[in-house]
Amino acid sequence: MAKVYKILVPKPGAANELGSEVKLYAHDEVVKSEGTWQDEVLDVFVANGWAMEVKADSVEEELEVPAEVKRARNEDGTLIGDDPTTPDVNEAWEGGEAPTKATKKKASTKKKSTKKKS
């Protein structure tokens, strides 16, 4: 059974068994191992924190990549708002679900101190 890896940090690595070709393994790329040579390359990636091995329940199971979430629009291109009377569906987003929010850290603001003249 071929191993499956997800690249976390873009890095160059061997692209064939002989190591005579190099390719850039891109961020968020999912790679199915083509043999022990690629397992060895990607195990080094895992050891350095550049990739992680993805476990699948069965061989037939495909990894599902979430589709890009887009705002819903009218025919004229204006944004559609959410209908508050339907709490289980968010009409403002295609597919009826709003994306999860990523929290941002606020940048700390430093107080500027002014020196008093004596």
Image: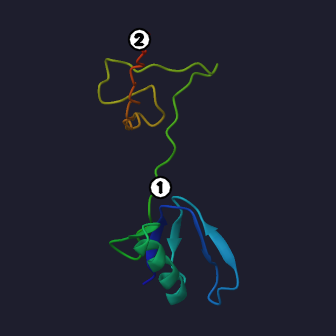
Q: Is residue 12 above or below residue 93?
A: below
Residue positioned 36% across, 71% down in the render:
56
Q: On the rendered image, what quadrant is the C terminus found in?
A: top left
Label 2 residue SS: loop
Identify the residue at horizontal 62%, vertical 88% (top origin).
17
Q: Which residue is mark 2?
A: 116
Amino acid type, label 2: Lys
Q: Are marks 1 and 2 in contact (CB under 8 Å)?
A: no
Q: Nearer the viewer, residue 74 or 40?
A: 40
Tell me: residue 92, above or below residue 31.
Answer: above
Q: Residue furthest front?
A: 118
The residue where tag 1 is placed is 65
Report how far apart the C-alphas of labels 1 and 2 lie in the structure.
59 Å
Give the label on residue 76, or none. Answer: none
> Could you tell which of marks 1 and 2 lies nearer the N-terminus?
1
Determine crowd level at label 2: few under 14, some 14-19, many 20+ residues with C-alpha closer than 10 A.
few
Residue 19, image x and y in percent? 65, 86
Q: Is residue 87 left or right of residue 39?
A: left
Give whichever of 67, 11 is nearer the camera.
Answer: 11
Mark 1: give few (<14), some (14-19) or many (20+) Cα within 10 Å: few
- Residue 86 in picture, x, y percent from top left: 32, 23
Q: Nearer the viewer, residue 29 or 111?
A: 111
